[in-house]
């Protein structure tokens, strides 16, 4: 349960540990209290991480201080998924890079804050695309598109996002980073032993 004491301790610790921005002021909290939905929930604070290490640290600290986390991209959700009473982590500013395109194997690797439309623009010269085309494609970030398993007008032809993901790097509540993707039987057996 997040209390004002937990939030103040979290704020202090975040400011010491993160390289990105840590904002708990009233104006920022108001700005992040809405998304494209009709809902409004004022968050405890906002983190604008510099990189994935900042994201991991923010998640781990929020867990330690019992403050919920709301990952956020462009806030294009119409159902309120990008707002909440906890710590908003805005991936859209800096955790938004296209890391690699492998045209031969037909895949790309990008960070959660990258805009879907920008990724598809980068893929176009290779005659590739990520299939889902939600109405918010010019602004929707990959993290939000993945979190919502987005579709779009052409989902019957191109599928939902789940049909286009090979693997996902995620950050668990303790701040550890893991990869979810295909595993060989030997890898599955080794994981089961842990």
Image (tube, helix red, strand yellow):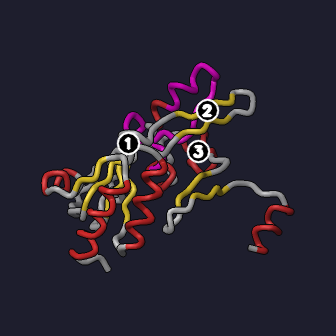
x and y, in percent, of residue 115 in the image: 43, 37
Which residue is situated farthest in the left direction here? 26
Residue 133 falls inside the magenta stretch = yes
- The front one of 139 and 51 is 51
Which residue is situated farthest in the front direction here? 16
Identify the image quadrant of residue 41: bottom left
| Among the two numbered marks 3 and 1 on one chain, the one whose residue lies closer to the N terminus | 1
| Marks 3 and 2 close (CB-CB < 8 Å) | no
| Marks 1 and 2 close (CB-CB < 8 Å) | no
Up-down relation of residue 19 to residue 137 (above or below): below
Residue 192 appears left or right of 112: right
Q: Which of pointers 3 and 1 indicates the residue nearer the eye? A: 1
Write down the residue under mark 2. Answer: 100
Residue at the image position 48 percent from the left and 41 percent from the top: 153
Please report the bounds of the magenta region as a residue range.
119-143
Q: Dot 2: within a 10 Å radius of its alpha carbon, few (fewer than 14), some, or many (20 or more) residues? A: few
Label 1, label 2: how far apart the Cα atoms are: 18 Å
- The front one of 135 and 112 is 112
| Among the two numbered marks 1 and 2 on one chain, the one whose residue lies closer to the N terminus | 1
Residue 168 appears left or right of 115: right
Mark 3: secondary structure: helix
x and y, in percent, of residue 147 in the image: 48, 55
Label 3, label 2: how far apart the Cα atoms are: 28 Å
Write down the residue under mark 3. Answer: 156
Residue 135 falls inside the magenta stretch = yes
Residue at the image position 25 percent from the left and 60 percent from the top: 45
Write down the residue under mark 1. Answer: 92
Q: Dot 1: within a 10 Å radius of its alpha carbon, few (fewer than 14), some, or many (20 or more) residues? A: many
């Amino acid at each position: 349960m997040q209390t004002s004491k937990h939030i103040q301790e979290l704020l202090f610790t975040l400011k010491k540990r993160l390289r990105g921005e840590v904002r708990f002021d009233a104006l920022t909290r108001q700005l992040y209290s809405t998304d494209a939905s009709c809902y409004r929930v004022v968050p405890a604070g906002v983190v604008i991480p510099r990189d994935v290490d900042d994201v991991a640290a923010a998640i781990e600290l929020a867990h330690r201080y019992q403050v919920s986390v709301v990952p956020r991209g462009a806030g294009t959700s119409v159902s309120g998924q990008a707002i909440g009473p906890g710590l908003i982590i805005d991936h859209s500013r800096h955790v938004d890079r296209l890391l690699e395109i492998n045209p031969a194997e037909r895949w790309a690797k990008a960070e959660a804050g990258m805009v879907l439309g920008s990724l598809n623009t980068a893929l176009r010269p290779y005659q590739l695309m990520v299939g889902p085309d939600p109405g918010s494609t010019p602004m929707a970030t990959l993290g939000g598109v993945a979190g919502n398993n987005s579709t779009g007008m052409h989902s019957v032809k191109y599928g939902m996002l789940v049909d286009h993901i090979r693997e996902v790097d995620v950050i668990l509540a303790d701040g550890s980073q893991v990869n979810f993707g295909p595993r060989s039987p030997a890898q599955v057996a080794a994981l089961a032993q842990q």
